[in-house]
Image (cartoon, rainbow, N blue to C red):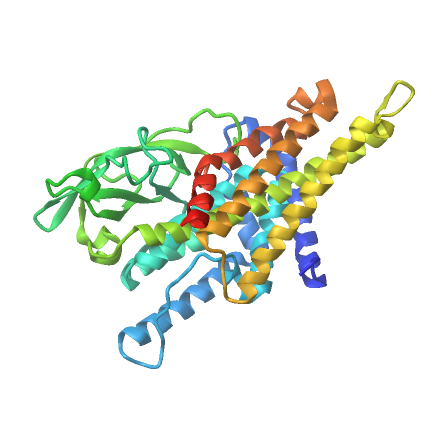
């Protein structure tokens, strides 16, 4: 694949029109007004039928799983959060990635809020939960009727999320008692449903403990969700802290209702999907920065001529186009692999994330530089895009973690 198909262009244009009509007029409000993004996302879902599509796909999947569980002609399958899950093969991947790209041209935080709720919280329930748990919690998240959070990061863990995890679950009769805190949790302040990841404390050393995940609902006794944290960028994506203080849960809230399913492999799949999604986010940021810079270079006159005639400005724009093409080709590769039924493995996803996150950051900072003093002002879009781009090098694994993953896979 070397260019978007006619059908994909139609989807892109429709989403772009939605962004121009529904998101861009509210950019200031989302960016500086502490307005949660969820009603905008729900309108996106309703406008393009994403909610109804999710219901239909969920119903078919549950029917297959019921038949398989009963020994019928259905087949069990491992649900994934692959980009192609939106409609089958490469076409489905393009359908799911194009809204990410288009939203990131205006408000990347919307994508983060949406992606965590659907791509991490709902997907974890779909991949690890029982049929009853999927029906109880997942459908409302997949349709975005409810907001989800995925809580793994802790104040003292960062990139070493599993190794230094302190949050615990302790058995108490037929129940579990959860304790611990989580930080930097996307949607944390407003989540209706939270996947709380912790270790089973059986009196053994922390490094030997099993990793479990529980589903928590807003308002449960002992479960506290803080207000939004102030941060550098992604202001339209609320981030908060979570606290569990002797939160009592039944076995029905333990995903899979078993302690014996290894968690790390499932987490690797989630990280792979999240990292490939970063490439689509980066492409949206890069495209918009380049578009703004080309227009600014043509219309802004310094020293008697448009600044686009100066070689140093041309060099910046040329490098932006280089990064745009490379990033777009990586997105196309994601779509092709989805069409072939071969989603990105963790190492390839890490390569994609490392390159595209750095490319987005370079392009956004050069856009600020090209705009000069104007680029430093909040009313110009490049200022926001530069702040938003930085987190692509941090979340879903820092650049340094990507480098480590890539090198380990090559060196054996």
Asked where in the image residue 379 lies, by quadrant, the reply is top right
Residue 408, x across and y down, in percent? 42, 45
Residue 132, x across and y down, in percent? 28, 62
Q: Nearer the viewer, residue 53 or 214?
A: 214
The residue shown at (21%, 40%) is 207
Image side of residue 254 versus residue 336, left or right: left
The residue shown at (61%, 47%) is 101
The residue shown at (22%, 43%) is 199
Asked where in the image residue 288 lies, by quadrant, the reply is top right
Residue 88, x across and y down, in percent? 53, 67
User: Quick one: quadrant of the N terminus?
Assistant: bottom right
Residue 313, x across and y down, in percent? 79, 28
Extreme residue toward the front, this view: 411
Answer whether residue 408 is visible to the viewer in this image. yes
Image side of residue 3 versus residue 341, left or right: right
Asked where in the image residue 170 lies, by quadrant, the reply is top left
Extreme residue toward the right, this view: 304
Answer whether residue 18 is visible to the viewer in this image. no
Q: Nearer the viewer, residue 26 or 205?
A: 205
Image side of residue 191 versus residue 383, left or right: left
Extreme residue toward the bottom, this view: 73
Q: Nearer the viewer, residue 234 or 396?
A: 396
Q: Is residue 68 above or below residue 264?
A: below
């Amino acid at each position: 694949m070397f260019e978007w198909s006619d059908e994909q262009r139609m989807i892109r244009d429709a989403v772009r029109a939605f962004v121009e009509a529904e998101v861009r007029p509210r950019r200031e409000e989302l960016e500086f007004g502490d307005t949660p993004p969820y009603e905008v996302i729900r309108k996106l879902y309703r406008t393009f039928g994403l909610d109804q599509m999710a219901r239909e796909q969920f119903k078919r999947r549950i029917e297959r799983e019921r038949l398989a569980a009963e020994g019928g002609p259905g087949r069990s399958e491992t649900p994934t959060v692959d980009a192609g899950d939106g409609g089958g093969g490469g076409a489905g991947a393009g359908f799911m990635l194009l809204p990410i790209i288009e939203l990131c041209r205006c408000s990347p935080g919307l994508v983060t809020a949406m992606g965590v709720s659907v791509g991490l919280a709902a997907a974890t329930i779909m991949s690890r939960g029982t049929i009853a748990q999927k029906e109880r919690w997942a459908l409302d998240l997949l349709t975005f009727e409810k907001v989800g959070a995925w809580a793994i990061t802790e104040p003292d863990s960062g990139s070493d999320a599993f190794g230094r995890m302190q949050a615990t679950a302790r058995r108490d009769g037929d129940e579990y008692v959860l304790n611990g805190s989580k930080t930097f949790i996307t949607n944390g302040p407003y989540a209706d449903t939270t996947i709380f990841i912790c270790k089973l404390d059986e009196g053994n050393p922390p490094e030997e403990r099993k990793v479990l995940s529980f589903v928590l609902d807003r308002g449960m006794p002992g479960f506290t969700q803080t207000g939004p944290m102030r941060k550098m960028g992604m202001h339209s994506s609320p981030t908060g802290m979570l606290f569990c203080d002797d939160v009592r849960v039944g076995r029905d809230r333990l995903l899979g209702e078993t302690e014996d399913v290894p968690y790390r492999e499932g987490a690797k799949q989630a990280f792979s999907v999240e990292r490939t999604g970063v490439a689509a986010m980066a492409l949206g940021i890069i495209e918009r920065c380049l578009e703004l810079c080309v227009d600014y270079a043509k219309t802004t006159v310094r020293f008697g001529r448009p600044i686009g005639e100066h070689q140093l400005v041309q060099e910046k724009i040329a490098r932006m186009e280089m990064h745009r093409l490379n990033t777009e080709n990586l997105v196309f590769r994601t779509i092709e692999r989805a069409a072939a039924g071969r989603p990105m493995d963790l190492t390839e996803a890490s390569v994609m994330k490392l390159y595209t996150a750095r490319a987005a950051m370079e392009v956004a900072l050069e856009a600020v530089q090209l705009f000069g003093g104007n680029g430093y002002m909040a009313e110009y879009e490049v200022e926001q895009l530069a702040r938003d781009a930085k987190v692509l090098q941090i979340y879903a694994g820092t650049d340094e973690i990507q480098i480590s993953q890539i090198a380990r896979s090559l060196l054996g």
